[in-house]
Structure formats: structure tokens, C-alpha cells
Image: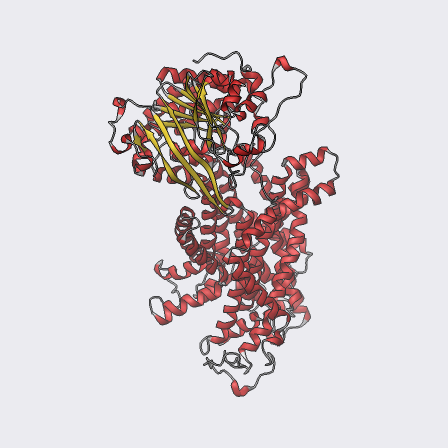
Amino acid sequence: MPDVTKTAAPADEAVDTPSVVAAAAPQQEKARSLWGDAWHDLRRNPYFIVSSVLIFFLLLIAALPGLFTSASPTAGDLVHHYVGKPELGKIGSEGWLGYDIQGRSVYARLIHGTRASIIVGVAVTAIVTVVGSIMGMISGYFGGVIDAVLSRITDIFFGIPFLLGAMVVLQSFTDRTILVVVFALAFLGWTQITRVMRGAVITVKQADYVQAAKALGAGTTRILFRHILPNAMAPVIVVATIALGGYISAEATLSYLGLGLASPTVSWGVDISAGVQAIRTSQHILLYPSIMVSITVLAFIMLGEAVRNALDPKLR
Amino acid sequence: MGRYVARRLLQMIPVFLGTTFLIFFMVYSLPGDPVLGLFGDKGADPATLAAKRHELGLDLPIWQQYWNYMTNIILHFDFGTQIRNGRPVTEVLGDAFPITMQLAALAFAFELTFGIGLGIIAGLKAGRLADNAVLIFTLLIMSIPVFVLGFIIKMVFAFQLGWIEPNVSTEQNWDELIAPAIVLGGLSLAYVARLTRTSMAENLRADYMRTAVAKGLPRRRVIGVHLMRNSMIPVVTFLGTDIGALMGGAVVTEGIFNIKGVGGVIYESITRREGSTLVGLVTILVIVYLVTSLLIDLLYAVLDPRIRYA
Amino acid sequence: MSTIDKTATVPAPRGGDHTGPLLEVRDLHVEFHTRDGVAKAVNGVNYSVNAGETLAVLGESGSGKSVTAQAIMGILDMPPGKIPQGEILFRGQDMLKMSNEERRKIRGRKIAMIFQDALSSLNPVLSVGYQLGEMFRVHQGLSKKDATARAIELMDRVKIPAAKARVSDYPHQFSGGMRQRIMIAMALALEPDLIIADEPTTALDVTVQAQVMDLLAELQQEFNMGLILITHDLGVVADVADKIAVMYAGRIVEQAPVHELYKRPAHPYTRGLLDSIPRLDQKGQELYAIKGLPPNLLKIPSGCAFNPRCPKATDLCHTEVPPLVPVTEQDGTELPGRKSACHFWKETIHG
């Protein structure tokens, strides 16, 4: 053992010096927040760029279908009835993707059907995010009996297979409008967000800054909305974005089963269920709306994945 | 541990009752009348209908119907009879479950091996070509609706290549179920792969991984023992809850490949309003779900010693 | 490669015949390629350790002390890490030129490492017995049963009470001090020639710190091991180290035998560190603190990296990088083992 030099402070007195020595992290030119950092990452992520462009176009089509086709999605001319072979090459012409059973332009129906799918996806996501977040926040923040009761209620709704439950709900409506489909999907869909939010809130609740806010006497609402919610939102946003794609896919699947949207609504789902009837003779009636659904779902899932990667630095 | 299991079992009771009542309520509050449907277009006089309803107990208040139904299940293992043809529901389900379980088992094996396999490849090569290839593959699988995937596989392998029969025979051959199992398990496979990848990429940066390398362990041991044990915990949770979901989610797949299983029963009983069949089926699925999630929680103790059961 | 050296070209004999230092780091550079640019974490570090000797590497976080250690261990994350230049000679052989398999065989067996945070550094889902026994199973091919017996011996050796009963416990079931003892046991398992301890006591309670440090020093003497002790705690250093290397912004700014450094620092940064230790005889006075923040490794200041924080900085310090030069007495007598990288080391040491 080297002998202890007398000029040096005794060991037990010196142990606290690192606070002076090693306090500060390397300087940063600009302060970065989680969201600022995420945005920095997102702008360079090819998945994010591709998915945003796709979503932008889908939203544009949904909002202004007239920009993309002048043909009517509902008026059919039976002259074209069942024309199975699309006239490829004449992109943009009314019949370039062929015609359906009633002689309506498949392309026009795709364009006009976008709105229904987007509305279903966005509306269901909005509802389940609000309901699920509130339930999850209350459950996670208050804990105890409230948590036990809410968690059991969540379990109850979670226990029913999603598609099966939606089928039962939809079966009870003869007039299946967009509103009905949204209700059926949201009825069982909120549990996912609730669970995610509950977990996130429980994690955030233990963070020092929340404890500090409590110690400073901040009220419950303030703590919940100013401190917990912004920090617990990240996983919810990711799950909700991916789920949005899932709801669009679910609507299409229900339509395929004959339990989704029904005419006169123009939607991909309606065309899909019509396409199933004609699967033997002309596959294109089923094919094109299925492709549109897949692309839309892909866009939202990709967006969700990109956001997840950006928000979670551990994954890099 | 014993106390924990007891508490979990107690918690399962309200969930079981709640879920079954919810589905019961949903089914029996459906507009439309199964009894009326029984007589077809000709209809019947109101007295006959009322008598039939009374016979089936459909004139009682809903909670009482539920009570009768559940006590019959629990005390006599009697799931009721189908209204249309008077077959006992147990018999209907007994016919439907074996093939669906077979299908679900195959789909499960498929998602387990390929999902974890792809996830490991992606996780170990995080950020590189293989990772991106797996990412794109899983994103595509996740975004194609099941019925589309089913039709694509049926079109290509049955009609174009002729490798498989378009419809599954009633003989329940394993090889005939391969294509349907791929369709059924495809989505879960993608989830398992993503989850494995995420979990591995996260744990790769853990301090204990650095320690394992510093100990001079060979790479396969560092990955195989130290990384895998930690990374599989979230994957196991997902796999556990997925067993029940596979069985309940086979409606579309079974329809496409013409498999006479649970999916078909679900579809028929919803469209024909066979309440007792549907509720009986959901009851079984809920039990499967509850039991598997309990087993998963207990398996956790083996995988992660940090979790305490109090 | 700038350094050409005889020992690197002529393969040195393995084992004890090698006469030079046990470990020698020569002109080591490490950089990290991040999305914001290249962070130069280590910029030409030289140091050496002999058998039975303790070298303390002192510095703030971000000074490159841990990165150097990780480079020696071969556990740098590459990418983003990169070693563009330098040599790490273990018994005269450059480890950077070895194959992965050769390096793996050195890790744990010849050079072992103790990490700062034992809780996160031990695998949470494997029992401590398994993790200790793994060393014997992998490196010596022992059976599971024998390995467990050796693990119990090791735990006894680092004074963990009731070792036999606790061998199948998991890391989270131990206290912080006990966990750090397990880390030490793991490093000692194969009686390596060199141990690198990266802030081994920082995460521990003050009362436990001394115990763990004493244990480490005692075992080091027993096995005549070389020890590189990385720390930012001057108190720990004073007790156990033979010589000290002070690092700043990826370079060694001062090197000295331990008591010399405390008596007469030859670099303003070292002086600042010493002055910021609270002392009983100066009770009531305001505590000294080095002004400013550690440098951003993406943009290391030109000239002497310490110049923005140095009370004695002149124009020369902004333009010229001071080399690490030998320090002498005022009359020119050599001070063995002393070096400083300050343009004004004379003023600092003798002023």
C-alpha cells in the first residue's frame, strides 16, 4: 500500500468532491427536448418520408376526390359490365382499372372510397385515444381500488376477441353507416390504449420531477396534465398510429365478411365485399381496393414505426 | 406463490363473469328474432312464437337468462342447444374445436420459430441491411389484411402452382393445414419478429452485455445465454396472449380455405343469431385466454427473478 | 500509424519472460462518429502499468478515462467508436492487431474489468453463482458443479457472508456493497495479471466505499496484479494509487507519483482539482470550483483544451497544444515519473 500523503484530504472528506469536478455534462450548443430530438431524427428517416407522402396523398384524395377523377363512383353504365381486362397504359382514363359488376369505374370508386376508410380509421383512433387515455391515466395515477376496478373492466372488454365482438355489434344494425362501423370498432378497441397509457403513467408517476411537483404542492389536475400526460404520451401516440392502420384493415375485413359498410356508401370495404362475390370471374374488383387498403395501412404502420424509433433512443 | 395464484384466480372470476355477460348481453340484445327466423318466410301465429320463446327461456329478463345459462354450464356442462336444428352446443363445439386447435397450434409453431428467428436476425444486425429487410417484410405482412393474404396464397399456391388443394379436406391432415396456418399466423409472426428485434436491440446495449463480453465469453454464449434470457421476456408475454387470439381469429382464414372449425361456427352463429352457440364459444375462448395469461404470469417468475409475487 | 516500435514488430514471448511494463498504451486515439459529427474522446494517450502497480486515471466525465479503459478491454462499441491510431501492448504484444478470438482469450483471463454500477452490470436474470461459475466453465472447462464450488470459494474470498447459502441468489437480492464485491470476485476469478476498475466505488455509500477499496487493494497485493483505477475521486486515489495520470479532453495533462502530485501539482487543472477538495483548516471559506464546463468533444478548443477554464491562460495557450514534457526541479534535477502538458508548468509547480 502506498502511504497516505498528509497534504491530501482524508478519504472520507474528499468523497463529495466529484460534484465539483464532474458535475456538468459536455456543453450542448442547442437545448434538445425529446420531441425536438425525435423531429431531428424523423426528417432523415426514409420510412417517415415515404409514409408522410403517402398519407398526405391519401388525405388529399379523401378531402378532394374530384381532383383525381371526374367519373362518378355511383353511376354505372352496363355497357362496361364486368369488363375484366383493364386498359393499361391509359392511366387516368376512367376505365383504366376496369369496371365493376354494375359497370362503374373501379378507379373512380377507389378514389371516392378513400374518404370512408380514412374517416373510419381517424375517428376510431380519436375515440379510443381519448377514452383509453383517460381510463389509463385515472387507473395508473390513482392506483388502488380505482385501478383494480378499471383494470378488471378493461380485462372484460379485452377478453372478447376483437373481430368477433365487432361482428356481433355490426350484426345488430341493419343500416351500417360509417358511424355504426366506428362505434363497433371503438367499442372494443379502447382497451389497448388504456393498457399502454396505464403502464406509461405508472412509470412516469415515479419519476423525480413528478415527485418534486407533488412536493411543491401542485394539484392533481396540474400534475396529471402538465407533468404526467406530456411524458406518458409518446408510447400512446406510437400505438395509436399503428392502430389507425389496424382499424382501416379491420373495417375492410368486416366488409369482406359482409358486415362492414354497405351501399350506398362508397368505400373500399363495399367494393371488397362485392369483389368477393365476383372472385371467380374478375379478380380485379377485389384486387384494387385490397391494394388500396394495404397501402393505407402500410403508410400508417410505417409512420408509427418511424415515430417509435425517433422517440425511443434506446432502439437506435 | 400460492397466495399469488389464489389472488389471480379470484381476480379472474369477475373478468370471466363480466366478459361472458357482456357477450351475452350483446348477443341477446341483437334486434331480430331467432325464433321468427326458425319459421322462415311463412311465419307463424303469435301464440306459437310465444310458446317457442317460453320454451327456450327467451321471454325472461336478460340477467335471468344469463343466470340460467351460466348455472347450466357450470353445474351440468350444458351449453344449451342450437335453436335451428336442436343440436346440443357442446356437440357443435366438439366438432369444431379440434381442427381449429390443430390450425392454431400449427400457426403458433410457425410464428414462434419464424417470428423469433427473423427477430433475432434483425436484432443482431440492427440498422443494417438484414434488419431493414426484415422490417420491410414485417411491415408488409402487417399491412396486408388477412383475407387478401389468404387469397394471394390460395391463388398462387393452389390455382397457379397447384402445390396445395384450395380447400382443406375433412380428414384434418397436417400438411393441408400448412398454408392456412401461414395465413393465420402471419400477422402474429410479424409482431413477434418486431418485438424480438426491439427487445434484443434494447438489451444489446445493456451494461450486463458489456460485462459478458469483458468476461471473455464466446459470442454465441454472450448472445445465447445473456442476451436471449432477457430479451425473450416480452416476447413470451405476447405469445401467451396470442394462443387464444389465434383460435378466435380464424374466421377469415377458415372461410377462405373452407375449414369447418370454430371460425365457421362463429360466423354462422352471428349471422343466424344462435346466441347460445356464440356465448358458449366465447366462454371457452375466455377461459383459454384467462388460463394462458395466468400461466404466462407464472412463467415470468422463471424467466425474471426480479418479479416478486406477493 | 505514427509510432513504429521494436516491440510491436518482434513478437514478444508470452507469459512472464517479457521484461517491459505489463500494459503499455501508446498514442491511443479513439473517436465516436455521431450524427452531430466526430467526437474525439481520446487524443493520444500514453501510459503504462507494471505488475503489482496501481495507476490511477483521474478526470471528469468525458475526459476519456473510461473510453481508454474500454479500448484496452476491447469492449468499445464499434461502430460508432473507432480507433484510428495507437497501440495497446499487453506483455509487449499489440492487442489491437490480434484476432477477435485472441483478444477474447485475454479478456477475463489476463485482463479483467470491474464496472461502476454493479446492479446493471450483472445480468439480472442469472444467479450470481451462475455468473461467477461461468468464468471457470468457459475459460477452464469446469463442470457446472465444480464451477459452483469455485464460485462459493470466490464469494468467501471477497467476504460475502453465508456464501454457500447465497450462491443461487440473484443480483437484486444483494446490497450495493455486496454486489460490488461480486463484481470484484468475478474479475478476480481467473487471477488475471491486470484489473481495470472503472469507478468501482462511485455508486456506493461512503461507509462501504472504503471497505470495497481496501478489499480491492488487499487482493491486488496478494496476487501481485497490475491495477488501473479509474476515478474522479481524489480521496480514493490518495489511499491506494502508486502513480496518477490526470486526463482532460482525451489527453493526459499530468503524470506523477501519487504523493508528488498532491504536494506540487504541475498543471493548473490538477491544481484546480486539489483546491476544490473541502479542507478542515479552511472551514468557513468558500469552496473553490473550476469555472466553466468540460469541453465539448465535438469541438475541442484549439491550443490547450483547458484554456477557456484556465486562470493562467495566455495567447500561447489558445494557439499551441502543449506537449506532455518531463517536469524538473528548479535547478534542473529530474523528477522521475513526472510529466506535465502545460506551457507554464514551471510557474505552476514552482510558483
Image colouring: secondary structure
Residue A59 image position (x, y, % from top left): 61, 66
Q: Is residue A285 depicted above or below A211 in this figure?
A: below
Residue B170 visible in the picture: yes
Left or right of B36? Residue A100 is: left
Residue B268 visible in the picture: no
- Residue at 43% x, 29% y is C127
Camera-nearest residue between A268 and B214: B214
Camera-nearest residue between B20 and C46: C46
Residue B228 falls in image quadrant: top left
- Residue at 55% x, 66% y is A252
Residue C95 falls in image quadrant: top left
Left or right of B235? Residue A139 is: right
Which residue, as the protein is rendered here, is positioned at the far front? C331
Give the position of the C terminus of chain B as an image quadrant. Answer: top right
Q: Is residue B159 depicted above or below C203 in this figure?
A: below
Residue B181 image position (x, y, % from top left): 41, 58
Camera-nearest residue between B30 and A142: A142
Q: How many marks?
A: 0
Residue B273 falls in image quadrant: bottom right
Residue C337 image position (x, y, % from top left): 41, 20
Q: Is residue B209 depicted above or below C186 in this figure?
A: below
Left or right of C212? Residue C4 is: left
Residue A277 image position (x, y, % from top left): 50, 75
- Residue at 57% x, 66% y is B271
